[in-house]
Each structure stands twice: as structure tokens, then as C-alpha cells.
């Protein structure tokens, strides 16, 4: 399982306090932006995966919005998932975006917020997301991209993730962006960038159930 140890240990230690972060308004803005994109596209998903779910605030919001959907949250931090485990509506699994432990074509909606900049291999992770998406599936994601010199992301990340990097990863995965929006962030995060993407070409459905990959 390709989980960067040092980065995950930081989130492990942060887990008990994560939901009290002063940046919570920026994270909540990212969640709202993703749900808005899903609503604008007109989806009513049945199988949903959140890649990098943290304490599962977004999966809970998805379950509230789409009560008939099966919602799974995946995160490399066990303590984050322990905080999230209080909501029994959700399926939770420890894992990395670069090696998703699911069969092909099993989710009609994949969401992700504030996780892209932490992926060790953005193109590889996006390719994995494209693999587990159903042929007509949707990816809706948002991240906290700094647009001003000295913003939060250049401070926190060794590999700043500007929108161009996100576009390159989406293209490498064979996905096509169908919507992009920029909404206000909070404090040192001046903007939240949200995108929706679909597969460039239809793919044959191999499985629909949310099954773990064979090991």
C-alpha cells in the first residue's frame, strides 16, 4: 500500500483536532463546491467513493443529500477513520489514492476534497480513480489552490498543485473536464477550485458491485 509514512503520521496526530481546525471554513467551502457540481450535472448516484475522506465530513454530507446511495470513504490515516467511524451509514477503508483497493468500474461518483496536493503520484492516483469509475461515472473534486504569492499551499506542500497540474493529471487519466468553478476560500486560502470530469470514451462495464480487488 503506497502510503507516504511521514505525511500520514502528521494526519494521524491531527485527527482528534482536525474538525476544529481554523481552516474548517475553507474545507467546508470545498465540500459545498463539490456537492454543487454534482447537483448541477444532475446526478443521483448509487455508489459513491470519497478519496481522502479524512474524518468523513463530505461522505456524511453526501449520505444526507443522497440517502439511497452506498457511500464509501477511503483515507490512508487510521486515526482519521476512527473519528469518522461514528457514522454507521458509511463504509470506511484505509488505503491510498495511488492504489485503490476496488474492482474496475464500480462507482458512478467519485469525490475528493483537499487531498490532491497530498498525492505522491497525482497522475497515477487520477488513473486509479478513472479505473474505478463506471463508464458514465463522474469525478467531482476540489482543492485549496493558492492564487497569490505566499498563500497556504506553497507553504504546506513541497509540490505546489496549481490548476495546471490538476488538468495534466486529469488528461493523463483519460478523463475530460466538463465543469470548473472557483469559489471563495478562507484566510490564507484565497480560492477553492472545483472541477467535474467524465471519461473521455465509454468503457465496457466489468462489474457494478463495490468489490475489493483481488490480492
Image (cartoon, rainbow, N blue to C red):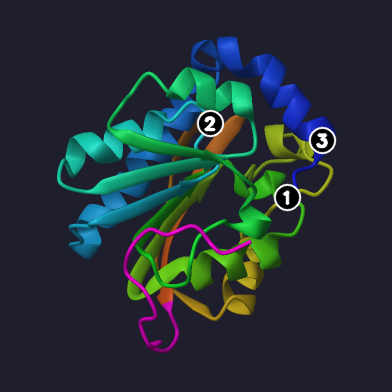
Disc 3 element: helix
Q: Quadrant of residue 12?
A: top right
> Mark 1 Cα within 10 Å, few/some/many (few <14, many 20+)?
few
Give the CA separation, mark 3 to mark 2.
Answer: 16 Å
Position of 129 with respect to 78 (left or right) is left
Residue at 16% from the left image edge and 40% from the top image edge:
67
Q: Which mark is residue 5?
A: 3
Q: Residue furthest front?
A: 215
Looking at the image, tell me whether mark 3 or mark 2 is earlier in sequence order: 3
Disc 1 element: loop
117 over 23 or under it: above or below: below
Give the CA separation, mark 2 to mark 1.
Answer: 17 Å
The reply to whether the C-beta atoms of the residues labelled 3 and 2 are less than 8 Å apart is no
Q: Where does residue 91 sit, x and y in percent of width and height?
A: 38, 39
Q: Which mark is residue 54?
A: 2
Q: Where does residue 119 sit, x and y in percent of width and height?
A: 70, 50
From which residue to which does the magenta span run? 199-215
Do we see residue 48 in this rendering? yes
Q: Which mark is residue 1?
A: 1
In the rendered image, which quarter contains the C terminus? bottom right
Amino acid at each position: 500500500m503506497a502510503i507516504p509514512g511521514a505525511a500520514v503520521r502528521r494526519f494521524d496526530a491531527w485527527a482528534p483536532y482536525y474538525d476544529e481546525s481554523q481552516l474548517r471554513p475553507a474545507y467546508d467551502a470545498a465540500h459545498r463546491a463539490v456537492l454543487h457540481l454534482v447537483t448541477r450535472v444532475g446526478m443521483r448516484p448509487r455508489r459513491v467513493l470519497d478519496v481522502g475522506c479524512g474524518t468523513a465530513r463530505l461522505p456524511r454530507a453526501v449520505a444526507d443529500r443522497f440517502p439511497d446511495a452506498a457511500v464509501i470513504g477511503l483515507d490512508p490515516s487510521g486515526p482519521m477513520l476512527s473519528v469518522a467511524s461514528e457514522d454507521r451509514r458509511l463504509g470506511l477503508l484505509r488505503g491510498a489514492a495511488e492504489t485503490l483497493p476496488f474492482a474496475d468500474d464500480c462507482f458512478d461518483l467519485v469525490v475528493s476534497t483537499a487531498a490532491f496536493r497530498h498525492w505522491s503520484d497525482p497522475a497515477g492516483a487520477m488513473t486509479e480513480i478513472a479505473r474505478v469509475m463506471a463508464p458514465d461515472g463522474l469525478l467531482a473534486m476540489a482543492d485549496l489552490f493558492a492564487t497569490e504569492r505566499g498563500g497556504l499551499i506553497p507553504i504546506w506542500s513541497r509540490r505546489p498543485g496549481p490548476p495546471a497540474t490538476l488538468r495534466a493529471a486529469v488528461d493523463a487519466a483519460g478523463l475530460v473536464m466538463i465543469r470548473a468553478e472557483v469559489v471563495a476560500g478562507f484566510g490564507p486560502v484565497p480560492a477553492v477550485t472545483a472541477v467535474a470530469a467524465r471519461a473521455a470514451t465509454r468503457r465496457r462495464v466489468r462489474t457494478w458491485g463495490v468489490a475489493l480487488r483481488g490480492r
